[in-house]
Image (cartoon, rainbow, N blue to C red):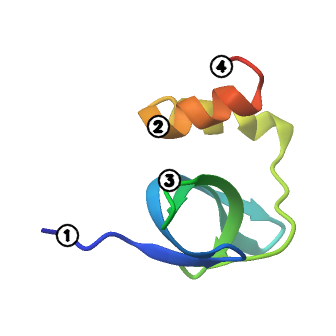
Amino acid sequence: MAQKKTTATPWGSATVVEEVSFPQSADDKEFASILQLLEIGSGERLLRFAYSTGGVARRGPVTIRVRDLTKLRRLVSKRRELAEAVRTLAGEA
């Protein structure tokens, strides 16, 4: 059985329930934007936007080009629980 990925949050350690990641570039910089559905020990769920360089998620501001939102929507639609969290964010749930 594969071990679930965990990450640190201000609320303590969290398990990554689902995530999508897509490559981005700006000038000569290569990185990926990430959207993660996390769950902490109490069962509460968190939605985290992040970016990664070299496969490591980084904290800080995340900027996604509007033209890439279609790509993000397509990726999220393939992840049931993540899609549900995003619909709640958009006021559709």
Q: Name the residue under label 1.
A: 2
Q: Is mark 4 on a helix, strand or loop?
A: loop
Query: Distance between the Cα atoms at labels 1 and 3?
Result: 16 Å
Taking the image as shown, residue 5 lies to the left or right of residue 60, namely left
Taking the image as shown, residue 72 lies to the left or right of residue 61, namely left
Quick one: which residue is furthest to the front in this view? Answer: 42
Which residue is located at x 74 percent, y 33 percent?
89
Q: Position of residue 17 (x, y in %)?
A: 43, 55
* Whether label 1 touches label 2, CB < 8 Å: no
Q: In this view, does 51 lie above or below 80?
A: below
Q: Which quadrant of the structure image shows residue 54? A: bottom right
Amino acid type, residue under disc 2 in the picture: Glu
Structural crowding at the residue carrying mark 4, measured as other residues with C-alpha within 10 Å and reported as few (<14), some (14–19) or many (≥20): few
Taking the image as shown, residue 57 lies to the left or right of residue 68, namely left
Query: Distance between the Cα atoms at labels 2 and 4?
Result: 12 Å
The total number of labels drawn is 4
Split into 4 quadrants, where in the image is the C terminus? top right
Amino acid type, residue under disc 1 in the picture: Ala
Q: Is residue 58 above or below residue 80?
A: below
Taking the image as shown, residue 26 lies to the left or right of residue 81, namely right
Q: Which mark is residue 93?
A: 4
> Is residue 2 in view from this perspective?
yes
Q: Residue 81 carries which label?
A: 2
Which residue is located at x 63 percent, y 39 percent?
72
Q: Position of residue 42 (x, y in %)?
A: 51, 62
Q: Residue 19 carries which label?
A: 3
Quick one: which residue is furthest to the left in this view? Answer: 1
Q: Earlier in the sequence, mark 4 or mark 1?
A: 1
Q: Is mark 3 on a helix, strand or loop?
A: strand
Query: Distance between the Cα atoms at labels 4 and 1?
Result: 31 Å
Which residue is located at x 82 percent, y 61 percent?
62
Q: Position of residue 84 (x, y in %)?
A: 55, 30
